[in-house]
Image (cartoon, grey):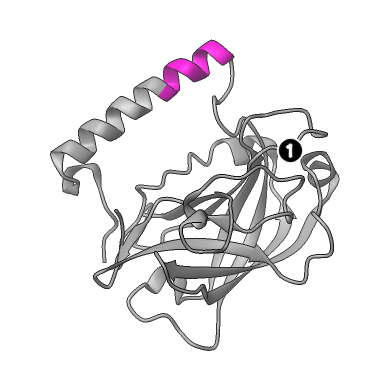
Amino acid sequence: MQGVTAESQPPVTRATAAASARILEALSRIRGERIFHPHGVGFAGRLTPQAQRLVGAPALATESEVVVRLSRALGLPEWLPDPCGLGLRIPDAYGDGRHQDFLMVSSATAPLVRHTILPARAFLDRPYSTVLPYRFRERLIVVGAAARDAAGPGPKLAELRDREFADLDLDLAIASVRGRWQPVARLSLGRRLPPEETERLGLDPTNTGGGLELA
């Protein structure tokens, strides 16, 4: 199975993506760093499917070594709430160099509001959502994540940068626009990545395929 490439996307989608990329690149040059999610920390991790395997999305139904980037959306001082981001890459999910990327941000669990971006005090304070929907088996879904047994808002960025291992576990889940969340896998974060490796990730939500299509 193959991921979505620029050539396979509709012309309007390609044009919109290209225009958006140029705008973000220009704003990032003005700021001198990424315009959104400028400060982050990366970890190696493992994705372990739940007992009930997800049919039709092999990237979420296969045990995999993954990479995760945790970041603050606006780069505000840490004592201020800021939307928190969770970028997940499943490397080579559809072949050599064809990754599955999910970009999630702190949000809410209930229908409708799971498409909103909400500030958080730290990285386990709120659940995460892709906000943007995916097409899966002829229906629209969002992909999300929530901490397992979190006591409090969790670690902040400065603390994570000092850890050699994240020691964080989250449940990865999917939900239809109005339906309940269905856990599909466990996401376990381990060894911290070197900063330069983290910044080279280039996570892109259009990196998808195998039954999942960004809608």
**Nearer to us in this view, 200 or 25:** 25
Q: Say if the magenta span includes residue 80.
A: no
Which residue is found at the position 19% from the left and 46% from the top? 9
Residue 80 location (% of width, % of height):
77, 33
Which residue is found at the position 48% from the left and 63% from the top? 111
Residue 27 location (% of width, % of height):
48, 17
Q: Which residue is mark 1?
A: 81
**Residue 187 in view here:** yes
Horizontally, is 136 left or right of 187 in the view? left
For the N terminus, the quadrant is: bottom left
**Nearer to us in this view, 142 or 59:** 142
**Residue 130 in view here:** no
Give the residue type that dot 1 points to: Pro
Q: Which residues are magenta?
A: 24-31
Horizontally, is 7 left or right of 163 in the view? left
Classify residue 170 by image quadrant: bottom right
Residue 194 location (% of width, % of height):
70, 41
Classify residue 197 by image quadrant: top right
